[in-house]
Amino acid sequence: MTATFSLLVVDDEPDLRTLYELTLLREGYDVDSAGTVEEAWARLGERVYSAVITDMRLPDGNGIDLLRRLEAARRSEKTIVITAYGSAENAVEALKAGAFDYLTKPVDLRQFRSVVASALGRAPSLGPAKVVTGAAARQPPASGPGRVGPGQTVAGPVVPGRPALISPPAMQRLAGASPAMQQVRSLIERVARGMAPVMIQGESGTGKELVARALHEVSSRADQPFIAVNCGAIPEQLLETEFFGHRKGAFTGAAEDRPGFFQAAQGGTLFLDEIGDLPLSMQSKLLRAIQERSVRQIGAAVEQPVNVRIVSATHRDLAVEVHGGRFRQDLYYRLNVIQVRIPPLRERLGDLGAICVAVLARIARDAGVSPPPRLSVDALRHLARYGFPGNVRELENLLHRAVTLADAELITPEDLGLGDEAFADSEPQALEAPQAAAAPAPGEASALPHDLVAHLDAVERDIITRALEIHRFNRTAAGSSLGLSLRQMRYRMARLGIHGAEHGSD
């Protein structure tokens, strides 16, 4: 096979480095190697690679140092980090630093080949299964969408060779030019290139699944399945079989083998909507599947490796759920590597006109109507006064109703069906994008801060300092009173520059 991809392997253990090199050479890659961060950087100064595979621990630094250098230099190489077994914090740190994916030791060479191939956008060859430590390798399941279960939808395939200038359908539906939506689109494009788990945060009706689909469609997994699961719509007793599948005869009524959501999403994206609704018992099983990248069907003796990207969404504040003991902290850290916040419609009313045009065009297209109906100026002003507790989903329902009731192509305020009671707690809103808040009048008690981040840091610094003083600078006790671990306290104190407790106890 002619080598078309060049790879740089960085590891200070000669035996492992040689094993990785030989494995990649058999796949047809052009491979260079290095034993330190500085040696790797020297190699990178000589040529551009398709990907860099680096161990986390190196004699003169670690893999994160190399990732940060690559990011600062705006290098194009995909990066894969190899971490020690069970080092979840290092894995999450690597993904946040821009790694495409990570592997844990002992490295399963079949999974190693699969992850490298995924980073390069090619299918791995199926060679003999080996593990660095000699443990038995695991046979991956056949790729394909699998069987569709409750609450699950599959995106149609994306045509290969799609022109780069044409946005995928889901990206086109993210209407609006407000700074908030521009930031959402920019973040989608940046995080789509990796494997880092993404948490989409937003109120009901803001379009969380649409953002997840956009993330999938602009990624290298676009021609693989997109499986959307509503975690709150599945009865608790069916969760395990729906997620992991079952074998024939595993229980009464299991008349045939049935794949689960993970198998259905093989090679693609698994979107877990309303992840906060999962019971704790299922959260622990989901955590294991994500950590081990393998699942065991009910009734099966062995696990099956899976290659899926996890994107989750919730309207809840999961940090509060963790503090209340309703959501596992370790699962939260695994899922919340990168967060995408979708603003509610009331925070981006400057996008209202563009959203209405896009929704009315889609309604007309689905109904085979041309030209699409239009909102009158008065109707748009009428909508801008409304608070939209149901966000974009509620707006779509209003417009569907208006199109049905309107006698003409032009939709009037009367067609919208919003009576005076709908505006009881609302104030007229401007149709332009929100402007910066005016400077507060002297002595105004409710003035907004000019720098929100600095304001919140000051509040947090004051609370932590007071807690330390109350507990005589015992960081463990002060942290416990605030629902924080000692490690979290140390991190916050360092970030906020709290030095008064340097001689305090833990």
Image (cartoon, rainbow, N blue to C red):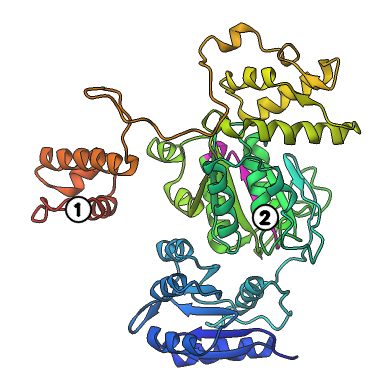
Location of residue 195 in the rendering, given as x and y in whole percent from the top left corner = 58, 62
Q: Which residue is mark 2?
A: 216
Quarter placement of the N terminus: bottom right
The label on residue 423 is none
Where is 362 relative to 36, above or below?
above
Asked whether, in this view, residue 154 is left or right of residue 131, the answer is right
Q: Nearer the viewer, residue 505 or 166?
A: 166
Asked whether, in this view, residue 176 is left or right of residue 436, the answer is right
Q: Residue at x 73, y 43 (%)?
A: 152
> Is residue 331 at least partly visible in the picture?
yes
Q: Amino acid at mark 2?
A: His
Q: What SS does tag 2 mark?
A: helix
Check residue 272 for magenta coloring.
yes
Location of residue 504 in the rendering, given as x and y in whole percent from the top left corner = 10, 52
Q: Which residue is mark 1?
A: 497
Residue with the most extreme top position: 420
Q: Residue at x 59, y 31 (%)?
A: 204
Q: Nearer the viewer, residue 274 or 432?
A: 432
| Bounds of the magenta segment | 267-279
Question: Quadrant of the rendered structure where residue 442 is?
Answer: top left
Location of residue 88 in the rendering, given as x and y in whole percent from the top left corner = 44, 62
Q: CA distance from mark 1 to mark 2?
A: 39 Å
> Is residue 260 at least partly visible in the picture?
no
Q: Nearer the viewer, residue 209 or 133?
A: 209
Q: What SS does tag 1 mark?
A: loop
